[in-house]
Image: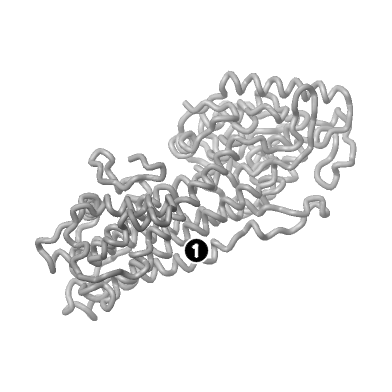
Amino acid sequence: MVEINGHNLTYTDLVKVARHGESVSISKEGVQAIIASRQRLDAIFETNRPVYGINTGFGIFAEYPIPGAASAKLSRNLILSHAVGTGEPLPKEIVRAGMLVRANTLAKGYSGIRLEVVQTLVDMLNKGVTPVIPSQGSLGSSGDLCPLSHLALVFTTDEENQEDVSGWAEYQGKVMTGKAAMDAAGIPRVILGPKEGLALNNGATFSAAITALAIIDAEYLLRVADASLSLSLEAMVGCLAAFDPRIHEARGHEGQKHVAENVRRMTAGSSFLDASGRVQDAYSLRCAPQVQGPVLETVQFIKKIVERELNAATDNPLIFEPEDVLSGGNFHGEPVGLAADYLSISMSELGAISERRIFRMTDGKLNFGLPPMLVDSQEAAGLNSGLMIPQYTAASLVLENQTLSAPDSVHSLPTSAEQEDHNANSMTAARHARQVVANVSHILAVELYTAARAIDLRIRQVPRGHLGKGTRAVYKRIRKEVPYQAGDAWWGPEIDRVRKMIEERGLFSAEQGEGVKNIDKAD
């Protein structure tokens, strides 16, 4: 059970709920904070003083007064008018992550929302009602208005309780109207009161959820990249001197030192390293710590930023003791947009240097005595294409990443008649970051697959040769999944199986102790 209170939501909690269906509850502290905030809002509402979003219009209509009796209609209209997203639906795990983050935000106690509204979100998570939310249409300022409105459309209603304006949701594997899904799950839909529509759809919640899940995947890919680098280094009988700790201490970057240590750890006991007599290797091998290390440090940096956003009060206005209502801009998605852009840029580099190692292993002039394209033998060249085209695929993904990692957060267009004159574009940045991370997963799968084949051919040349302790374990795990094939074969499904090993976290065995160290230097 994951307990939320607006302050302590972690990445581990997010994975448990979003990907593994763990149940959620609001802590006693969270319940008290929600109730107290609502009481403050009720007291403010009784004074009839003008407060943005409570008894005024929204955006450009902020100066338009709204009668108190119309507050429920105001909240309902906000949700209806803002649920105008487009594009393919967000994956289920992202929607669940967004729901959890929003519930946690509201449990912080600054939003003036009723406990029953937050509890309804929690009940939907626990009973498996997942709104269908379009992936496009958010600027990330004022938060993710469109996707959050599609979320609210499912579990909120009005006196008429119409089914045809209840959005869509998935329940028990079937897509149906939001009303039908809520009815089937036995969860009453809620009629919103003052400010509650704004509390639900104001904040860069889905931007944060997408980026957080991408960061979680990127962390594992950093470990995979150190393993694929190590295996490629041995396949090409590389030089170990470039990973000497004295070199990396001399520069002082922690990420660089970490990657070099992982390579030494993985390749300990290898007979292939330094077997060629070369003095130094190409950059994709020799400078890998200097490239992969900064990627690690970037992920560490943005991980802290996004974790703060998971526990942030992001709607507007916010309600403080004793009865203060302050209008600000916590909904602005700039912190998340920049973080997502940093993630895209750094992970693109991780994929790019991996592809360069794939290229070297398949080039007969650069792979130090292995057959061109890693065909089974020189005699097989021509009749067989070997791994020529898997390298094409990796190169294609690298090129796509170069486009996707062009920063989105530097782009802005004004909206709402210039009232919202600088927008974050955080949702687009987050979606691009997620795709970059997915592409890198496949690039690394190609490198692991290629390196395993290169090792097979190298061992044929040097029958007494042996891999390091860590690389040997990874190689065996790959070969257990995809045995060596001499002639051309349908490589695609085999590479996909290696990618599945990565996605399912099946590349390392912590019990055997051969895995590379992870981002926080714990096995």
In the figure, is residue 269 to the left or right of 425?
left
Numbered label tally: 1
Q: Residues within 10 Å of mark 1 (few under 14, many from 20)?
A: many
**Residue 163 visible from this viewpoint:** no
| Residue underneath mark 1 | 401
Is 335 positioned to the left or the right of 323 in the image?
left
State whether residue 320 appears in this view. Answer: yes
Rendered residue at 42%/61% (across/down)? 351
Picture coordinates of residue 419 (x, y %)?
Answer: 82, 50
Looking at this view, is 408 or 66 the one in front?
408
Location of residue 506 in the rendering, given as x and y in whole percent from the top left corner:
31, 46
- Residue drawn at x 61%, y 51% as measured from the top left: 337
Residue 244 location, quadrant: bottom left
Residue 461, horizontal then vertical, whole percent: 13, 69
Residue 512: quadrant of the picture: top left
At mark 1, the secondary structure is helix
Seen in the picture, residue 58 relative to 402 is either above or below; the reply is above
Q: Position of residue 222 (x, y in %)?
A: 40, 52
503 relative to 327, above or below: below
The quarter of the displayed image where residue 81 is located: top right
Q: Nearer the viewer, residue 293 or 15?
A: 293
Q: Amino acid at mark 1?
A: Asn
Figure quadrant of the C terminus:
top left
The reply, left or right, for residue 441 in relation to residue 377 is right
Task: Tell me the residue at 84%/31% (across/down).
Answer: 70
Q: Is residue 442 above or below residue 85?
A: below
Q: How is the image coloured?
A: one colour
